[in-house]
Image (tube, rainbow, N blue to C red):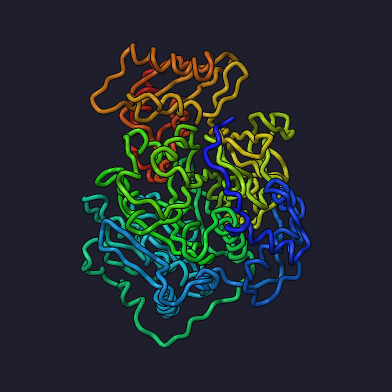
Amino acid sequence: MGDVLWTPPADVRERSRIGDYLRWLTAERGLDFADYDALWRWSVTDLDAFWRTIWDYFQVIAHTAPETTLARRTMPGARWFPGATLNYAEHVLRMPGLADDDPVVLGYSQSRAPVTLTAAELREQVRRVRAGLRRLGVGRGDRVAAYAPNIPETFVLMLATTSLGAVFSSCAPEFGTRSVVDRWQQIEPTVLVAVDGYRYGEKPVDRRAELAAIRAALPSVVHTVLLSYLDGQAAPPPATMTWAELAAETDEAMEFAAVAFDHPLYVLYSSGTTGLPKPIVHGHGGILLEHLKMLALHHDLGPGDRFFWFSTTGWMMWNFLVSGPAVGAAIVLYDGNPGHPDLGALWRLADEAKVTYFGTSAPFLLACRKAGVVPREQADLSALRAVGSTGAPLPAEGFSWVYETVSDTVQLQSLSGGTDVCTGFVGGVPLVPVYAGEIGCRCLGAKVEARSADGTPVVGELGELVITEPMPSMPVGFWNDPDGSRYREAYFDLYPGVWRHGDWITVSERGSCVITGRSDATLNRGGVRLGTAEFYSVVEALPEVVDSVVIHLEDPEGGAGDLLLFVVLADGLELDDALRRRIAGELRTALSPRHVPDEIHQVRAVPRTLSAKKLEVPVKKILTGTPVESAAATGALANPESLAAFERFAKERTDR
């Protein structure tokens, strides 16, 4: 059991948005809940009633009213709010509680000076770009693709596109040509908006050659729009218009296409580390309701807040972040290297932008801890109420570091979910304490359970993470999957009618959760299952170890198999037998003798995706003889050259 690091204040129900929602439930529905657990149980049992309260409490603007809340309670195939028409962008631009001259978008960048948009300026920019897209012939169902970073223009483009009922898709400009083409050839966009390049730290990165290659590989693209972001004056190639021309002055009024609840909003992609990235289609209504619920009730965001999450446009956390104005929160965007000039940069940004909710990844927090960063000594973080962590499990020592060096009064919310649902389904809420190393709760409306090997639900022990009731933000489907077979295969093959997410989870008696890594990268020795997250927590606590990846190669004849640990060491260090013994000793003491590696090897880098996730499964495939090009899509990697060491190692093992 983790130590209690934060406790809800006695008047939490008076001060929080979820407290206001509970009062509304009593006044409007005659419902009273003693605690969060009772509220959660109702939310995952009476799905119709719960999601209808989200619709009514947040005053969703319906162009036509829904016939019912949930017409079909099955997975896949649940039908939410049939008959309703609405528009996601209309709700983001409603910006409840904000005046026209209130700042709502604060864009910071290593490529140019900061940009601030007020509520009125955001609406005006969206109106102009929407008219520009209409001039290019964009209409309902057409796809608009953005090869652009986390800057205000990308947000404006997304809202303009979706206001028309067209479908948005973004790739971060650090994505390689192959990675982008693998995504967009599947959805065939007609308009491509792209930057000419960007700065990463002090390094200028020109992307015009990549843009030309992407454009050549996408015959569906009729119009290309160039946003000159790197040098501010790049000449557009032939047959290309500029962003200024797209956003030109116009008299055309702002309107919002009334679309069905499940009309495609945007297409996100699985990481694409093995095979083609899965094109995951999210709908207007499902994303709207899920984000209203999470941002207001779980993250406690509203007017007066400044919401930041470090993300690129290639990660679902960008889509999550930019829904902030729908609950009245201003959003803080950042484009650049989070470690430049040092790991204190984002904390100083939080001070400058007066961030109230600081979201980042677990690897970033752990890197700050390892580097000895003390944010409160570098920045005034008095505005900060909460810190969010996702992307990987955050171990107990990461929690302790936040409370010791950032602030002892913030609520630290570790959350986990995915691109597949574009949200977190386990996370934090103002009503429950923070325990070191634990995710506070299962989120409202998300019936998350742990399942044992025989499929029965378990509490207090490790199991497969499943979701046993539908959620509105589950995908509408995959693009170009007419019979739904790819979608079913991705989530519903193992347990028919139940969503299997692919993580190991332990749900405690008190409702908190611990996720211990991907279930397809599990370590299983002598019948003991262990998620990789615990392994990394021990190994990477050693000052000499910068990064690591652990792989279990099963014995086809049923033996213990080989447990291989690869470590990246601090500059100038070489792995020797003394350090091997120390690593083995730490693992033996902290975990069990079964988890002492058979071999420990030094590598220069651990392969990671562009959103910093470790590539355990592709490394395992390479080590078992799969060619690199089949094991991983190198364009989806931050450091594809890192795979070569594992390929050499696999060859040496075979030659032994």
- The part of the image, by quadrant, that contains residue 463 is top right
Percent position of residue 491, x then y: 63, 44
Residue 490 is at least partly visible in this image: no
| Frontmost residue, 338 versus 219 | 338
Identify the residue at horizontal 33%, vertical 40% (top origin): 374
- The part of the image, by quadrant, that contains residue 630 is top left
Identify the residue at horizontal 58%, vertical 65% (top origin): 284
> Which quarter shows the N terminus?
top right
Q: Is residue 549 above or below residue 632?
A: above
Percent position of residue 574, x then y: 27, 20
| Frontmost residue, 525 versus 369 | 369
Q: Is residue 194 above or below residue 610?
A: below
> Which quarter shows the C terminus?
top left
Q: Is residue 631 above or below residue 241?
A: above
Identify the residue at horizontal 35%, vertical 83% (top origin): 249
Identify the residue at horizontal 45%, vertical 32% (top origin): 397
Instruction: Judge from the rendering whether residue 163 lies leftward or rightward of residue 481; answer left or right.
Output: left
| Frontmost residue, 462 versus 647 | 462
Q: Is residue 130 above or below residue 56?
A: below
Q: Residue furthest right?
A: 30
Percent position of residue 345, x then y: 30, 48
| Frontmost residue, 163 versus 449 | 449
Percent position of residue 403, x then y: 44, 40
Q: Residue furthest front?
A: 10
Q: Residue furthest bottom?
A: 251
Residue 235 is at least partly visible in this image: yes
